[in-house]
Amino acid sequence: MKIAAAVSGFLLSTAASPSRADNPVDSKQTIIHIAGHAVPVTAGGLYDRFRSNPPLSVIESEAPDLDLNWFRGIKKEQVAIGFESYSPNFYYKNSKITAVFTADLQRLKELMPEEILKEVQPLQVWPGRGAVALTAYAYAYCDNDSYNEISLAIVTNQPGTSSFGPFTLIAQSLSNDFWGYVLKLPVNTELARVRGVLGYNLPKWLTDIDLKETEGSISFEVKDSDTGKLDFVFAGKKLGDLSHKAGLVKNSFTNQDRDGKLTYGYAVSRQLSYASSSSAESVDLTLGDGSFSTYIKTLKLGKMMKYEYVPEFQSALYAPKPLAALDAEK
């Protein structure tokens, strides 16, 4: 199945990246323990040395070309999220591509837990159709060393607010404040998997995700975790006319913890270089016969509503909180 998208719409902005993420663990490894799990990490890497709390002076010395001023204004706090860590987690140098597709609304509702559906619903962009955001991230340099990730998320309303379908989607796009429910989130390092599952209650698993770039495109080849064979390829054009006006985008997700209690988490991203397109030639999603491809096919994807190319961004990922705390923060 191949989807080369034609588009009209609005964006759930959610990543792709530089060379360090091509092979995230290509040096000697050491084993650390996280909540009883033996996890291989890069020996001497940021996580090995600092467990998610590296001094910015270290980042500055190792990557003097990076602008770290935004991070200086964010205070980290020690948190217990199934293990001791620090929030937010910093992502210093990254890139991404995102495509938002229409999908079968009834199928999206079936994939969301009943308790979450009481709080949020898939946005109906037109009768019988919701929206999903497919994002490929390459984190080139972050507190968790470097890794690649694929996110598939349902676009929803914010908990405690009414859903007005496409008008809610427009409002989220204009405010750069997006909400979703994450369906799938494979990664290509065990460190990212264990931290994501235990600490953030996210549907992560370990598989090969290879980043490939040409002069005009960026693509992510995702392997099937069971067979090791190529499952699907998500590719996007490197768009011209990039904006370099730094802007903040917030992506929040509703979830359940291991005890079934409702939670929410969010990331704030500082986009440093970005462009979007509605061209049918901007994106290729080539699905195969693997488990992830089979899952995507059940969504009955339709039009691609928008493509975003973000070759440079920074991000801060905050630890999840009880959903009830969201009302207190309003």
Image (cartoon, grey):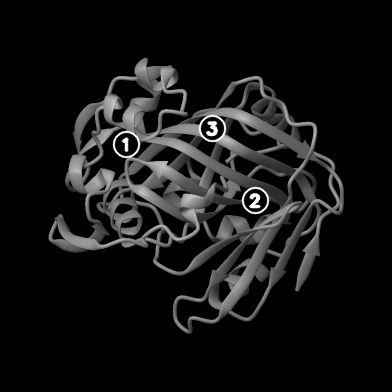
| Image position, residue 277 (x, y; %) | 80, 40
**Front of the two marks 1 and 2:** 1
Identify which residue, 60 or 156, lies in the foreground.
Answer: 60
Cβ atoms at labels 1 and 3 below 8 Å apart:
no
**Front of the two marks 2 and 3:** 2
> Which amino acid type is shown beneath numbered disc 3?
Gln
> Which amino acid type is shown beneath numbered disc 1?
Ala
Q: In the image, what residue occupies the spot 69% across and 42% down?
A: 309
User: How far separated are the C-alphas under marks 1 and 3?
Assistant: 18 Å
| Image position, residue 304 (x, y; %) | 78, 51
Q: In the image, what residue occupies the spot 64% across and 39% down?
A: 310
Quadrant in which the C terminus appears: top left
Choose the circle earlier in sequence order: 2 or 3: 2
Residue 158 image label: 3
User: How far separated are the C-alphas under marks 1 and 2?
Assistant: 23 Å
Looking at the image, residue 291 sits to the left or right of residue 240; the answer is: left
Residue 327 drawn above or below residue 291: above
Quarter of the figure with residue 80? top left
Cβ atoms at labels 1 and 2 below 8 Å apart:
no
| Image position, residue 241 (x, y; %) | 80, 31
Q: In the image, what residue occupies the spot 45% across and 76% down?
A: 225
Q: In the image, what residue occupies the spot 64% across and 28% down?
A: 172
Looking at the image, residue 45 sits to the left or right of residue 250; the answer is: left
> Which amino acid type is shown beneath numbered disc 2?
Val
The residue where tag 2 is placed is 132
Residue 319 image label: 1
Please tell me how crowded label 2 is: few (under 14), some (14-19), or many (20+) other residues with Cα within 10 Å. many
Say what secondary structure mark 1 lies in. strand
